[in-house]
Image: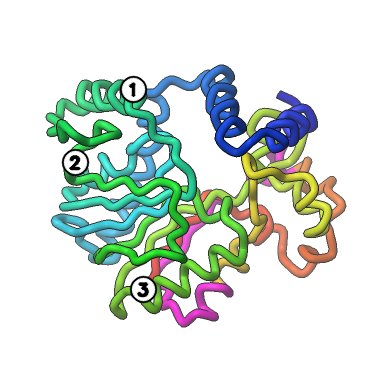
Amino acid sequence: MKHTHKTLLFKSLEILPNRLGFATYHWIQKAFDRSSLESKIKKSETTTKRLSEVCNELHIDLKDKTILEIGSGWYPIMPYFLLFRCQAKKVFTFDINQHYQKKAIALFNATFSKMYDCKLEIEDNNPFHLPSAVAYSPSKDITQIALPKADIIFSRYVLSHASEEAVYKMHQKFKSDFPKGTYVIHFISPSDLRQHGDKSISMQDFLQYSKAEWNKIMTKFDSHNRLRFPQFIEMFQSLDYEILFTSYDSVDPNSPNYKLFMELNLHEDYKKYTTEELTAGNILVVMKT
């Protein structure tokens, strides 16, 4: 779908009451999503493999650890990989919205079990059809509530979709609520979501707008703070996090996206950064409180 049409659609949904708007959004996501459940799971398997490689390199043992996941998404894919591949003991997963649906999770459980030949022990009275080792807390602002004890804080492609203020506040909370030396691991996708269905625009198209202009364009269904790699690092360092590891993908200078990026009229807010910093994608940051 062309990005202008998608924006118009999301703006229309924002007029609806919150519950109806999100219900309609869920229906649209299902109707237009051509990827299979198996392919969604496989994408997270790639993330898990990368996570395991970096943790091994840094001598971080995930086995028997309690993990706090920020941003649950639509399915408990990463919690299951953390439990069954990384052998974590417990995963607490928090989300500002509620996307899990019991019927969808039941299908997911059957698919995951078949793909990885594992037995899921589902709690009979669990409202989301989850095993006891996964504790799901939807509709929660983690900056405003008491958080459970955990050895590791983890997120996968979530930080870009919270406000800059929310990202700062949650990391303030991690510093104050968790013991010094707690590991924090983030996979971050800093690309413009509107490009995912419209290859005519750059993955960094939204960098041409001022903050005020972008706030008028984005909606609660496609929110993006537009923070670049060095901005995330500067924020974490300002809160006295110890950065242990960083990596990111660079854009191929011969790719169509690089050409589209070079044609952008960048807003003044971003002109102080290098092309590599602005186009850094698939970011991974590992740090300690």
Q: Residue at x 58, y 74 (%)?
A: 234
Give the amino acid type for the residue marked by disc 1 in the picture. Answer: Lys
* Residue indicated by mark 3: 288
Find residue 152 and report its horizontal and vertical position in percent: 29, 63
| Residue 68 in view, yes or no | yes
Earlier-in-chain disc, 2 versus 3: 2
- Mark 1–mark 2 Cα distance, whole angstroms, equals 22 Å
Give the amino acid type for the residue marked by disc 2 in the picture. Answer: Phe
| Residue 45 in view, yes or no | no
* Residue indicated by mark 2: 84
Q: Residue at x 73, y 29 (%)?
A: 9
* Residue indicated by mark 1: 103
Q: Is residue 150 left or right of residue 283?
A: left
Give the amino acid type for the residue marked by disc 3 in the picture. Answer: Lys
Earlier-in-chain disc, 1 versus 2: 2
Name the disc covering residue 200, or none: none
- Mark 3–mark 1 Cα distance, whole angstroms, equals 38 Å
Q: Is residue 148 left or right of residue 273?
A: left
> Which quadrant would residue 33 be assigned to in this image?
top right
